[in-house]
Structure formats: structure tokens, C-alpha cells
Amino acid sequence: MSVRLVHAPLEGCDAEQSALAHAFATTLVRCCAAVIEGTKPAALFSFRPPACDCGNAACRKARLRETIAAYARELPLHGLGLTVLGHAGDRVQLLVWRSSLVEGIVCDPELSSFLEASGYRCGSASELVGCFRHRLAAFHLGIELHFPHEVGVLLGYPVEDVKGYISGGRETCRGPWKAYGSASEARRRFGRVAASEERCRRRFASGLSLAALLS
């Protein structure tokens, strides 16, 4: 969690472990800035580890597992969760979420009713994330052919936009997601997300550590 944008050796890590931890943190901030800022409940992202000098595929995989496991242990201390969904070539697919915001989804009658009607369990934030993890992992493994577009709710998209996309409604505008309601309101939402992402990335670029961003 002490990783900064400017790469430097980490205490207790060799050069390759430091490089891997640095690359992962940089990708996390780039792809999940709005989750770190508390603007979005969750984000999906992929990570391609940097080349490893050991030249051993098993060694590379082991080091990647260790790095992800370390982040998965530490992030909950800051209110975030992290889990692996699957692999695609040399990339690993991941889901990161902010537990308090997912709990807000569970407690929202409209959102929970929509998700329950789609077969999700909304008894708690962990139960809901578990359902999404199962469906997303099944898709990435090729077990399920259809992507679970209901995940848009978990990613912070308005439910009207998620429903509109699933039903093939008339798109009104697009930004980070496709909108099907008020275009002006959607653009305001897009702007809020973009501003929070820029703020997080700018703070990281200024030299703050990942731990400082999460505090």
C-alpha cells in the first residue's frame, strides 16, 4: 500500500516483486479511480504483469498470485474488496468494490428488487458481490456465453440505463456507459465520475501513495 507512481524498491521485496506491486497499483489507480474516490461502487479491470527476468512461467504465475493475494488482504482494511474473475491470455480479469457503496445498493428497494428479479441474492453486500463474481467468472471461463449486463448496477450505472441497455431501448447519449434517460442528467453524472477519476489520478501522480489515496 506504500506504492507510489514513481517506482522505488519496496521494503521486504526484491526488484521483481517491487516492479510487480508497482505495476498492479498503477493499474488499480488508472482503472478504479472512481471506486477509490468513493464515486462508484465497483469496477472491472484487467491486469497484464510486466515481464519477469526469471524466464519461468510457473514462477511468474506464483508471483502474480502472491501480489494479488497481498492486495486482496490489505484493501479491505480501507473498505475495498478485490477478487479474481478469470484469465484471458496473459491478462487476469478482476473486480474491485467499495463495500459501503455496495451495501447502499442492497438497501435500495428499487435496485435490490431489480437484481432479485434477475436472480441475484441481495441479503448483504458480500452476498451480492458473490453472486456477481460467480456470474462474471462463469462468463470469463466460457461456461456462460452471455455477459451479465446487470453488473451495470454494481458499476454505478443508473438502473434506468441498465434496463434500457438490456431491453434494447433508445439511447439518448453515451459516456462511460450508454444512457437511456435524460441526456442532460446523464452528462452531469459522466462529469462527476470523470472529475473524481481525474482527482484521484492527479493525487497519485503528485506523489501520494496508494495507502494515502485510500485513507
Image (cartoon, helix red, strand yellow):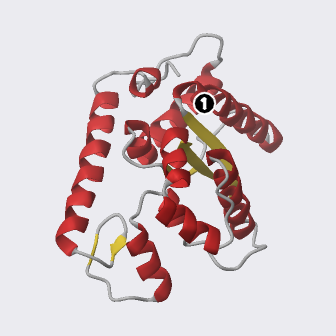
In this view, the residue farthest toward the right is 58
Does 197 sit above or below residue 106? above
Element at badge 1?
helix
Q: Nearer the viewer, residue 5 or 32?
A: 32
In this view, the residue farthest toward the top is 11
Residue behind mark 1: 76
Amino acid type at mark 1: Pro
Question: Residue 166 appears at what percent x and percent y?
Answer: 50, 82
Q: Nearer the viewer, residue 131 or 22?
A: 131
Q: Nearer the viewer, residue 131 or 207?
A: 131
Q: In screen coordinates, is 43 left or right of 147?
A: left
Which quadrant of the view contains residue 136? Answer: bottom right
Residue drawn at the location 70% of the way across and 79% of the way down: 145
Question: Residue 50 appears at what percent x and percent y?
Answer: 58, 41
Question: Residue 140 appears at what percent x and percent y?
Answer: 69, 66
Which quadrant of the view contains residue 82? Answer: top right
Is there any visible trace of residue 42 in the rendered image? yes
Does 46 sit above or below residue 68? below
Residue drawn at the location 50% of the way across and 34% of the way down: 25
Does 80 sit above or below residue 159? above
